Image: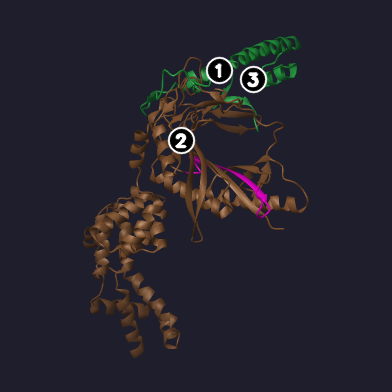
């Protein structure tokens, strides 16, 4: 029996405000426990929450970028439940009149585009953090009151791969908007998934399980794969799925049922009396819409048509806003888009990935990379030497010409210097020379490699290969 | 609408309040009279009144995104019945 998977994702994105949603405490990750709290976020009697204007603005930017219709009237509600991560015993959230309704996100899976509906996006406050130890639990309220945007997808995701792409697209958009860091491991982006199976063509949804505790994009995909397999096995063996919350366990690679709730949670939502409602005019909404940056998918299309890049290259360049901006700044200086793209997606990406940093933190200006590329194209530097030089440039923040002069990196192309280099390579590697002479063509490449190593990358590899072949063949 | 003792018990549980048998009967009666009062309000014709979540005096009250001093950890944990390593200490909770 084949089944169709139906997945809906609930994403909580921490909005990148400086202060919390309803008070002036700093919204920062990693501060000493309970050092960022005040009477408002601790819910002391008599305190009064007031909404952070940036939280509202960021929420609106995200909602508009997700093609949602921003509501002209929205309000906050109290969601009541008892749990120690919630100092007030209620969470300020939005219930029946959320910030935005009805949008969509476009994803691309194996070349095909697909729209996934977004049911709603609303603002709420984060809860505190619990640490469970032997015999007791510890509570840190630094995170309590940090603004979140909850984004709820329609149950229109039909595979773990699509779920992964949905998250990746959502992350790209939120990062372009500069409203969320989207670091799942630090918890600034969190994702719960509703998963069920149904027979193909069935209109109704099957009974779903809610998956929690997935701390990376990969974990979401793995957990969904596991859960779909588990549900299929239950159904095929004649059982039925229980509606329950299941936790993903990264170590065992399984989802496990949480103690199931005897009765459905009754949150007794009611309007938050401390926060007046929000009324937005069409003009205000349009002003925010006009302020939205070019979003990743549109930018990718523009790169493809304007710079004649292929979809793969354009995808890499637009994966991060800073990368796309760096690329365009370079092309503005030197209109060789493909060469610049290759340098950015190759050696430069290698550098910032291996340094575990991002392009914006590197001491590299667009004109510096462009100069380096020109030096290679003019034959002053070999590719290999240029790559090594790039690393030096990033370490020191100094331009290529200065370093070349200092380190004497100009490509060795004159024959006398080459001859001396090859003398040494041939003398040092008699075995490989014999191999080559006895017909092993590969040995030549080994010797070329040795010459490049000896010259610290300064030799012109093409000339080395030609000269070496000439000498060995004539020997 | 009649409010039974069981209804009162459920509401008390949601609010984590322990009530005696006598109190449950008392509050069930009082809740019932509150609901009756609301039912009476329902008799009014409000077809020309738009629903309101708040009194319509205030709207769009916002504050700038600026940081203010937080309380000291000593002040924050000073009211806690128990604390450990800078954290509030609570009985073990695993959902």
Residue at position x 32%, y 82% from top? A466
Q: Which contiguous range is marked in magenta?
A: A183-203
Q: Residues within 10 Å of mark 1 (few under 14, many from 20)?
A: few
Q: Is residue A287 above or below residue A419?
A: above
In this rendering, would A125 be left or right of A229?
left
Q: Is mark 3 on a helix, strand or loop?
A: loop
The circle drawn on residue B15 is 3
Chain identity of mark 1? B
Report whether residue A377 is seen. Answer: yes
Which mark is in front, 1 or 2? 1
Q: Are marks 3 and 1 on the same chain?
A: yes
The circle drawn on residue B45 is 1
Report whether residue A409 is seen. Answer: no
The location of residue A394, given as percent across then percent down, is 31, 54
Residue at position x 67%, y 20% from top? B11
Which mark is in front, 3 or 1? 1
Which shade is chain B?
A: green
Q: Is residue A438 above or below residue A132?
A: below
**Among the chains, which one is brown?**
A
How far apart marks 1 and 2 lie (CA) works out to 52 Å
Q: Find disc 2 in the rendering and name its residue.
A: A29
Q: Does the magenta stretch include residue A186?
A: yes
Display colour scheme: by chain
């Amino acid at each position: 029996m084949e089944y169709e998977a139906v997945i809906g994702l609930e994403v909580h994105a921490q909005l990148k405000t400086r202060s919390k949603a309803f008070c002036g405490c700093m919204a920062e990750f990693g501060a000493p426990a309970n050092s960022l709290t005040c009477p408002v976020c601790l819910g002391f009697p008599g305190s009064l929450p007031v909404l952070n204007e940036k939280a509202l603005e960021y929420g609106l930017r995200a909602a508009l970028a997700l093609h949602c219709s921003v509501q002209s009237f929205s309000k906050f509600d109290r969601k009541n439940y008892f749990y120690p991560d919630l100092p007030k015993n209620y969470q300020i959230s939005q219930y029946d009149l959320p910030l935005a309704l009805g949008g969509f996100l476009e994803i691309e899976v194996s070349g095909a585009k697909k729209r996934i509906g977004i049911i709603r996006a609303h603002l709420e406050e984060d809860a505190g953090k619990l640490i469970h130890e032997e015999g007791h639990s510890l509570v840190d309220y630094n995170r309590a009151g940090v603004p979140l945007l909850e984004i709820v997808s329609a149950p229109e995701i039909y595979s773990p791969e699509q779920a992964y792409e949905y998250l990746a697209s959502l992350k790209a958009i939120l990062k372009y908007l500069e409203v969320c860091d989207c670091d799942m491991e630090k918890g600034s982006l969190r994702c719960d998934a509703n998963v069920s199976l149904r027979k193909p063509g069935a209109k109704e949804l099957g009974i779903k399980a809610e998956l929690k505790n997935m701390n990376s994009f990969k974990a979401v995909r793995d957990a969904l794969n596991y859960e779909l397999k588990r549900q299929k096995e239950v159904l095929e063996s004649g059982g039925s799925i229980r509606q329950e919350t299941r936790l993903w366990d990264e170590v065992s690679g399984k989802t496990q049922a949480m103690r199931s709730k005897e009765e459905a949670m009754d949150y007794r939502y009611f309007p938050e009396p401390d926060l007046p409602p929000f009324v937005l005019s069409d003009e205000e909404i349009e002003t925010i819409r006009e302020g939205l940056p070019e979003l990743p998918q549109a930018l990718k299309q523009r790169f493809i048509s304007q710079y004649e890049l292929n979809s793969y290259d354009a995808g890499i360049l637009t994966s991060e806003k800073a990368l796309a901006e760096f690329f365009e700044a370079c092309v503005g200086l030197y209109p060789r888009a493909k060469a610049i793209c290759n340098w950015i997606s190759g050696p430069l990406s290698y550098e910032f990935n291996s340094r575990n940093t991002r392009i914006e933190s590197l001491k590299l200006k667009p004109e510096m990379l462009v100069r380096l590329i020109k030096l290679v194209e003019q034959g002053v530097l070999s590719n290999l030497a240029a790559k090594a030089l790039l690393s030096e440039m990033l370490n020191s923040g100094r331009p290529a010409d200065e370093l070349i002069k200092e380190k004497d990196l100009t490509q060795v192309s004159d024959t006398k210097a080459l001859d001396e280099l090859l003398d040494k390579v041939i003398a040092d590697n008699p075995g490989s020379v014999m191999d080559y002479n006895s017909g092993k063509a590969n040995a030549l490449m080994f010797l070329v490699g040795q010459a490049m190593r000896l010259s610290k990358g300064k030799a012109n590899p093409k000339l080395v290969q030609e000269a070496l072949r000439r000498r060995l063949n004539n020997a | 609408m009649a409010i039974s003792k069981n209804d009162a018990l459920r509401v008390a549980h949601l609010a984590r309040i322990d009530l005696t048998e006598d109190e449950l009967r008392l509050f069930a009666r009082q809740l019932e009279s509150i609901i009756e009062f609301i039912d009476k309000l329902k008799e009014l014709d409000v077809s020309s009144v738009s629903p309101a979540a708040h009194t319509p005096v205030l709207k769009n009250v916002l504050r700038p995104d600026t940081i203010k001093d937080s309380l000291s950890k000593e002040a924050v944990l000073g009211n806690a019945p128990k604390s450990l390593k800078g954290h509030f200490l609570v009985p073990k909770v695993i959902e």
